[in-house]
Image (spheres, helix red, strand yellow):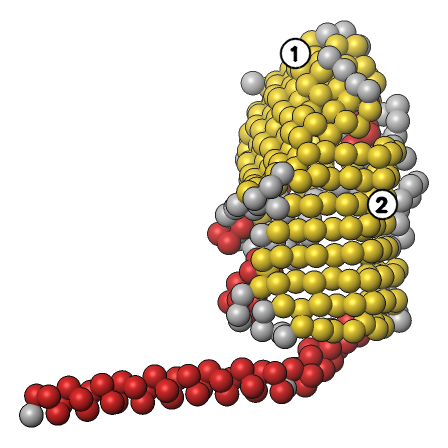
Amino acid sequence: MAEDRQADAQTQKRRWHRAAIALALCAVLLAISHRPILLAIGRQIALHYAARENLKANFRLEGNVFTNLTVRNLHAVPTGPSDVESIDVDLARADYGLFAPLRHGLTSIKNLDVRSARIVLNPAKAPLRPRPPDPKKKITLPDVFPERVHLVDATVIVRNRPHDFVLEHVDLDLNPRNPGQLKIDKLQLVGGQMWLRVAAQTSYANRILILREVALSNDERVRELRVDASRIGERKLAINLDYSAGAGKLSGSFALNEAQASLNTDLHVHAEKVPAGVINKYAALPEDCIRGQMEKLDVDLSGLISAPRTWQGKLIGREDSLRKSAIFSSKESRSTAASFRSPRETAWRFCKGATSSRARTSFISGARLNCRPI
């Protein structure tokens, strides 16, 4: 009797095994036979979403849908109001795990390969300037941090005044197993600053991008830029910068995490002997807005990026022969201006809800910040 039961159990087990194999084969055959249908459905979905953004797109879609997709000969132009002026991509391929995009979104992409891409954006007629985000809109961190990235001849242009932002003919290879390289034929900022043939060494282990020794000019260099997206699944991102200009140096760290439909920030900056013109250059300010040299600057700031009333921290600086004008401006047409030439040390503590009559008040895009001397 025991032997009969054991034989029956083995027979039943073999039947289930055969049924599982047959089911898997049916699924494979179904995927193969219906791949053209699935690709056609995917193409129509993409065209639908493009039309919602007032874009007319034309492209060819390839792949097996479940683990990879390839877009060839993509061309998109606006048919109405749109931030996009044109998109042209010869080839874009994404590899991912089975059904992973449904569970983890774009963070599930294992390999991203883009060749001969040109994207031109025209977001607004008004010049782009650093502005606080709209507090009514939810702010999230980007999802696109593949495990491996390969870009060949990629160009991004953002229309602006007085100059366009241009990132032209970019070659980038990010491989977690081997060192890579970044090459940019032309980099132009909205202030008109331009660099040609920019190159950097890269590493990309565990979604941590590191750029080293980026020579911007003879006396200006990004010694290291680190973008840590290893915890992007937890909605956290960290950025570290080590920069030098002449005899000056600047280091900073910037941590972001999603909170309360916004981004909670933690910023730390330390600078010594940095030419004040660097601020004009990277903040898109007029060339002579700030002149002189920043002998020392320490900034510690935290809070929700879209809610200035939550910002807390301190700023300590020593300026030598520095002339400053039009520090802050607001939608209320208010401005704060200052001019000083002699060396001095000043420190302010940014306080949440300070009400002292001696408090110094600045306005940034209509948001009130209260500051008082330490």
Q: Which residue is drawn at 58% across and 64% down?
A: 96
Question: Measured along the vertical axis of the image, is residue 256 above or below residue 80?
Answer: above
Question: Measured along the vertical axis of the image, is residue 326 above or below residue 229?
Answer: above
Q: Which residue is drawn at 56% across and 67% down?
A: 101
* Residue 291 x/y as whole percent: 83, 18
| Quarter residue 373 falls in | top right
Crowdedness of circle 2 by 10 Å Cα count: few (<14), some, many (20+)?
many
| Quarter residue 274 falls in | top right
Q: In this view, does 252 lie to the left or right of 280?
A: left
Residue type beneath disc 2: Glu
Crowdedness of circle 1 by 10 Å Cα count: few (<14), some, many (20+)?
few
What secondary structure is found at the residue carrying circle 2? strand
Judging depth in this view, the residue of 354 and 162 nearest the camera is 162
User: Which of label 1 and label 2 is nearer to you?
Assistant: 2
* Residue 271 x/y as whole percent: 66, 20
Q: Residue at x 74, y 51 (%)?
A: 151
Q: Name the residue under label 2.
A: 168
Residue type beneath disc 1: Glu
Q: How many marks?
A: 2
Residue 345 got which mark?
Answer: 1
Q: Which residue is drawn at 39% across and 84% down?
A: 20
Q: Is residue 306 left or right of residue 334?
A: left
Q: In this view, does 64 lie to the left or right of 18?
A: right
